[in-house]
Amino acid sequence: MFEEIETDLLIIGSGVAGAYGALLASSMGARVMLVTKTELVSGSTQWAQGGIAFPDGRDDIPSHLEDTLRAGRGLSDPTVTREILGESLEHLALLKELGMDFDPELALEGGHSRPRVKHIGGDRSGLFLLKFLHSKLIGRITSLERHFVVGLRAAEDESVMGAWAFGPNQELIKITAASVVLATGGSGQLFSVTTNPPEATGDGIVLALKAGATIRNIELAQFHPTALMDGSLISEACRGEGAILLNKNGERFMTRYDPLGELAPRDVVARAVINEERSSGGVFLDLRPVGDLANSFPTVYASCVDLGLNPLSSPVPISPAAHYQMGGVSTDSHGRTTVAGLFAAGEVASTGLHGANRLASNSLLEGLVMGARAARTALKELEVPGHCDDAPPFVGGLDLYLRPQIQQIMTSCASVLRNGVEIQDGRRRLNLFESFETSLPSEVETLNLLEVGKLVLSGALARQESRGAHYREDFDHLSSIAFHVDQTKDSISLVPFGI
């Protein structure tokens, strides 16, 4: 037996896209249910040190558009990007109306041609934003914490009409909903060192794939260039305030790779750091030029101190770490996936904004705009759930102790620098793992990582070029034609873009 629940709109994930989408949906008179596998204030949003890259007024939209397209290396969709940037100012006004207090100074971050990034609480923007949004949701929606969604329910016409979830005690729960929004975040836990929280296991990608959705450009994984040895992020804003990168010889090197120096786009800086690590033996970030580091960037300062480092007296060792998933569930500019009744927003989605390399602080911006768009569109197109006689699904899993092996394979085959031989070897090794039936969320997460890892390696092998965050040493050039790599349960295809 299992518990049954009904709602109009089911939102899976409680980060910025899920929480903000739920907030706007709740004002439209519908029943909204927000489900998260951990606590409400969790996920990558609360770890975000960067701010929100709102355009600095309407006059700044063309410049912001140009910066985003330049960073995206030919894969950002100009129309989608223009829509998101234009609508973002509406959400900035709404957040202020609701009582959100932004820091007074605009920040300059990597890839931006001018200061425009709004911070909240210094380098704790994501945490402050998420707490604020959830404070506004109290009493307006139904929230289910520690409920892990393990499958989407399909009607006879294959449209999505709800989900199956494990409750806090592994009990099975059947949820019926007219529409479902995936806002489950990324898959940073694919790699040994990541800036992402433990829950970033690619669950939404696997849910969508099994439901028949198209997964686009999942091989495009961004590595943040400045992370400490444990994956703790050192915000790009530190470099915007004067921090500089040095190799082991104490030499500043970034201007040899890009005229923007330390403020070049992340893909450029990450590759430069790897190159300098190989040639000199290590790379360091000198934070001493940043004024009043402990107060301006308290999270960064505390992370250094926790590792026994004193950033006020000497440069700290850094290296790239898995940070953001540019690809994801393919959607249009309103969050619709290729499956009726299923929407996606935030890091789990591939909207066309980020292209092959995300511009700093555009992620929270996209989460707000697309979370709102997906929720609003889902409610406007709400239909009575179709007939469904589905039985509880087979839930597969993989031993938790195998997760480090998956991470080691992905780190060696699909990090900043890639090549075909290693990618093929990684695919062979991942195919050796065998799943089994389980009711333990941790084992389902491990299997989800395996499935997303296979998608990443298949996409990386198919993308025979170097573009943005995807760099192939055996194809170290940009293809003359930009293309998307689309994958479904049964196929992979290259889709020309921009012609």
Image (tube, rainbow, N blue to C red):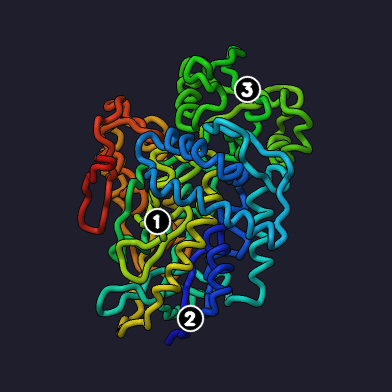
- Where is residue 421? Give x, y as percent: 26, 32
Circles 3 and 1 in contact, beta carbons < 8 Å: no
Indicate the amino acid at tag 3.
Answer: Ile
- Seen in the image, is 9 located left or right of residue 283? left
Does label 2 or label 1 sit earlier along the sequence?
2
Does label 2 or label 3 sit earlier along the sequence?
2
Badge 2 element: strand
- Where is residue 158? Give x, y as percent: 27, 73
Tell me which residue sits at (28%, 41%) in the image: 498
Indicate the amino acid at tag 2.
Answer: Thr
Dividing the image into 4 quarters, which one contains the N terminus? bottom left
Q: Mark 2 — residue?
A: 7
Q: How many residues crowd around disc 3 within 10 Å: few (fewer than 14), some, or many (20 or more)?
A: many
The Cα–Cα distance between marks 2 and 3, rounded to whole angstroms, is 51 Å
Question: Is residue 81 something that shows in the picture?
Answer: yes
In the displayed orientation, state which residue is furthest to the bottom.
1
Examine the image and state in which quarter residue 98 appears.
bottom right
Tell me which residue sits at (24%, 34%) in the image: 481
Image height of 397 relative to 156, above or below? above
Q: How many residues crowd around disc 1 within 10 Å: few (fewer than 14), some, or many (20 or more)?
A: many
Dividing the image into 4 quarters, which one contains the C terminus? top left
Is residue 299 or residue 50 the one in the foreground? 50
The Cα–Cα distance between marks 2 and 1, rounded to whole angstroms, is 25 Å
Q: Mark 1 — residue?
A: 333
Query: Where residue 244 is drawn, which disc sits there?
Result: 3
Give the number of the mark in front: 3 or 1. 1
Badge 3 element: strand
